[in-house]
Image (cartoon, coloured by chain):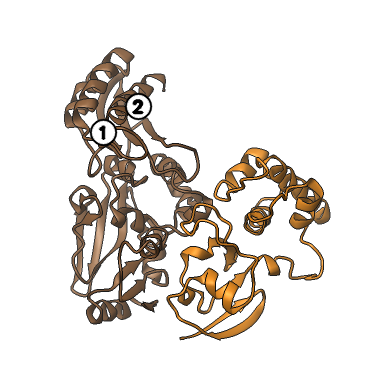
């Protein structure tokens, strides 16, 4: 089946099995290894991508569902200047919010989505927002620090 | 496996007619996990996500009609749900995680018919009705008659759940939901409990209770409800209700909890009403 969609802000057309999972299409056909497969059951959030601006789990989507949609992976999270880091990525680096790094792409997608909707979420709100993204290394504290720091940096930029 | 994404109900009816063995997929958060685990095999999957009529939330005469394909996140964001159906709001907020709720739908949670379905106890006490549509037309069925057992519903071949009709619980000042899981996010409930209570002059006039994860389907207990009516919402009255609740439930032992524990908690959850 021919699947046409927008991938990281560029139109793509692929020939693929419509019943393969979206994550496999992205990783194996498109070479984007940002989305990670952790649990394959929707519990870890490592595979999170944006579909039409909403964070969704690419391991629980079929390739056919991407037809005509706009898909953004962590590789395309900073479209205005793709060679620099998104403020959330920068904050993750500065706050030491990355240990093994496996959950990081999913965390970044969830956090950047949160900050696109809410300028200054509370720590409690940040914890709730990332409650579907599992991290076995950091204990979450530095991740919440990073999202908070990114919110402040982005808020400064706007005002 | 073939995948279809019909964009109109007419196209859907044709597909359901041509592919009687097809699986119907809403958000996919249950179906795709089950397919990957090899628990079921399907020659064809028909996705409902592009059907506009399943995507609307609209008020109608003191009820809210929620399209079966509306995601749980959209339900949480809806101001009418917030204002008129706080009980539904609480139960939807307890399901999965924000990422799961961005995909999972109310219709999916109902049609999966899990004994642990997080929205079901609230929908039972709210008296939700279901609109079932097929090429032949529509029929309305109370949720309680629709769900027949674990994973078993009254959905006929060629039929889909198109919307859920939920009456506003006018006059019910107490709208309580509690879910006990092994953690906060992404937990399958061990026991859940929904209650609606209408009081007058500090006496309970009408009580509606439903428990999840303590039987093959959601458990109601008219005896427990009657036992509270006419009484104040006191610990003394609730202790009697809790005993009736423990007698009504039919829990099993599984990886998450023992039957004894579930029975005890199902009663204890009722006592929480004394603190409201």
* Chain where mark 2 sits: B
The picture places residue A48, in percent across and down from the top left corner, at 58, 60
Q: Using a 10 Å C-alpha cutoff, classify the residue at mark 2 as few (fewer than 14 neighbours), some (14 to 19) or many (20 or more).
A: many
The picture places residue B211, in percent across and down from the top left corner, at 29, 36
Up/down of A7 relative to B154, above or below: below
Q: Quick one: which chain is orange?
A: A
User: In the image shown, does B167 or B54 lie closer to the viewer?
Assistant: B54
Q: CA distance from mark 1 to mark 2?
A: 14 Å
Q: Residue at x 37, y 33 (%)?
A: B175
User: In the image shown, does B115 or B206 lie closer to the viewer?
Assistant: B115
Side of B63 where A130 appears, left or right: right
Q: Residue at x 25, y 60 (%)?
A: B131
Q: Is residue A113 visible?
A: yes
Kindly indicate the quadrant of the structure image that contains residue B37. Answer: bottom left
User: In the image shown, does B94 or A34 lie closer to the viewer?
Assistant: A34
Q: Using a 10 Å C-alpha cutoff, classify the residue at mark 1 as few (fewer than 14 neighbours), some (14 to 19) or many (20 or more).
A: many
- As drawn, the label of residue B269 is 2
Up/down of B160 relative to A111, above or below: below
Side of B268 where B144 appears, left or right: left
Per the rendering, the colour in which chain B appears is brown
Q: Which residue is mark 1?
A: B208
* Chain where mark 1 sits: B
- Verify CB contact (< 8 Å) between mark 1 and mark 2: no
Both on one chain, marks 1 and 2? Answer: yes
User: In the image shown, does A39 or B75 lie closer to the viewer?
Assistant: A39
- Which mark is in front, 1 or 2? 2
Side of A93 where B73 appears, left or right: left
Side of B140 where A85 appears, left or right: right
- As drawn, the label of residue B245 is none
Return the disc, 1 or 2, that comes first in the chain's sequence: 1
Kindly indicate the quadrant of the structure image that contains residue B94. Answer: top left
Up/down of A13 relative to A75, above or below: below
């Amino acid at each position: 089946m021919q699947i046409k969609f927008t991938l990281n802000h560029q139109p793509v057309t692929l020939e693929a099995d419509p019943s393969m999972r979206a994550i496999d299409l992205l990783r194996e056909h498109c070479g984007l290894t940002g989305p990670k497969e952790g649990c394959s059951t929707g519990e870890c959030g490592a595979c999170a991508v944006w579909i039409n601006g909403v964070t969704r789990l690419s391991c629980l989507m079929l390739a056919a569902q991407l037809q005509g949609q706009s898909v953004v992976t962590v590789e395309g999270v900073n479209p205005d200047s793709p060679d620099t880091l998104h403020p959330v990525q920068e904050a993750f680096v500065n706050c030491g919010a990355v240990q093994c790094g496996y959950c990081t792409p999913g965390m970044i997608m969830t956090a950047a989505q949160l900050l696109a909707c809410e300028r200054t979420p509370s720590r409690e709100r940040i914890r709730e927002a990332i409650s579907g993204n599992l991290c076995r290394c950091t204990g979450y504290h530095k991740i919440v620090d990073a999202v908070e720091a990114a919110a402040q940096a982005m808020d400064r930029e706007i005002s | 496996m073939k995948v279809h994404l019909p964009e109109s109900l007419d196209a859907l009816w044709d597909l359901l007619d041509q592919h009687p063995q097809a699986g119907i997929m809403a958000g996919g958060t249950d179906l795709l996990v089950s397919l990957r685990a090899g628990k079921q095999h399907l020659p064809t999957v028909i996705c409902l996500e592009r059907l506009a009529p399943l995507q609307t939330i609209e008020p109608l005469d003191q009820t809210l009609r929620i399209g079966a394909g509306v995601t749980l996140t959209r339900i949480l964001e809806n101001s009418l749900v917030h204002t008129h159906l706080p009980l539904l709001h609480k139960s939807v907020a307890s399901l999965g995680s924000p990422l799961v709720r961005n995909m999972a739908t109310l219709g999916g949670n109902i049609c999966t018919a899990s004994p642990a379905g997080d929205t079901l106890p609230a929908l039972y006490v709210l008296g939700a009705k279901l609109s079932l549509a097929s090429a032949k037309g529509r029929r309305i069925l109370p949720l309680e008659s629709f769900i027949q057992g674990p994973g078993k519903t009254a959905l006929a071949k060629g039929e889909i759940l198109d919307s859920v009709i939920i009456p506003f619980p006018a006059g019910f000042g107490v709208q309580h939901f509690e879910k006990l899981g092994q953690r906060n996010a992404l937990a399958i409930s061990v026991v859940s409990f929904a209650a609606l209570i209408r009081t007058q002059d500090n006496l309970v006039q009408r009580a509606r209770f439903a428990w999840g994860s303590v039987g093959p389907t959601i458990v109601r207990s008219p005896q427990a409800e009657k036992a509270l009516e006419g009484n104040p919402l006191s610990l003394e009255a609730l202790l009697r209700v809790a005993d009736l609740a423990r007698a009504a439930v039919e829990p099993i032992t599984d990886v998450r909890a023992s039957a004894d524990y579930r029975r005890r908690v199902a009663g204890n959850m009722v006592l929480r009403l004394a603190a409201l």
